[in-house]
Image (tube, rainbow, N blue to C red):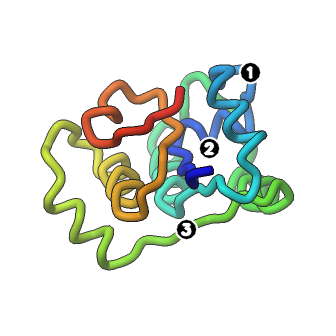
Amino acid sequence: MRTTLLDTMAVLRSCFRPELLSRRAAERILDGRGSVVFSMVSLWEIGIKMARRGYPDLELPADWDERIVAGFAEQGIAMIGIEVKHCKMVENLPMHHQDPFDRMIFAQALQRDFSLVSSDLESPLYLDEVIW
């Protein structure tokens, strides 16, 4: 099975509101143990959004960072970091999407040939396998 990267909203929904995941996304996350990853980029994005206004449809606990990392570790879902080659790939992506966090996640998925769990309607403009 191809490794699958979770975008930030898939991370948040998986951890705090799994009922908001599509059935297909939930199945991929549950069935793909060992071949599902999330990005450090998501934690960075969550931190910035929490500092600004949070998420209107999600109430996150104060220890959201620890819960995400520990919960995924228990499920065998690893975290990937940002590499120089991902930064360079962002430069070459078409400007369909302006969000820098999403662009980095797209670059990571493209560079590593991962599929992506995302409800973002622009994801298929970048990747050939988007699960939602």
Q: Closer to the camera, 5 or 129?
A: 129
Q: Secondary structure at mark 1?
A: helix
Disc with the residue nearer the chain's start (1 vs 3): 1
Above or below 84: residue 129? above
The structure residue drawn at horizontal position 70% and vertical position 30%, both measured from the top left corner, is 26
Asked if the residue at tag 3 contacts the one at tag 2, i.e. Cβ–Cβ closer than 8 Å, the answer is no
Q: Secondary structure at mark 3?
A: strand
Tell me, for residue 80, which label it has, or none. Answer: 3
* Residue at the extreme bottom of the image, as rendered: 84
Asked if the residue at tag 1 contacts the one at tag 2, i.e. Cβ–Cβ closer than 8 Å, the answer is no
Q: Is residue 111 left or right of residue 55?
A: left
The structure residue drawn at horizontal position 77% and vertical position 40%, both measured from the top left corner, is 30
Disc with the residue nearer the chain's start (2 vs 1): 2
Tell me, for residue 101, which label it has, or none. Answer: none
Q: Which residue is mark 2?
A: 11
Q: Position of residue 61 (x, y in %)?
A: 75, 43
Q: Secondary structure at mark 2?
A: helix
Alpha carbon separation for disc pair 2 and 3: 13 Å
Above or below 58: residue 100? below
Q: Which residue is mark 1?
A: 19
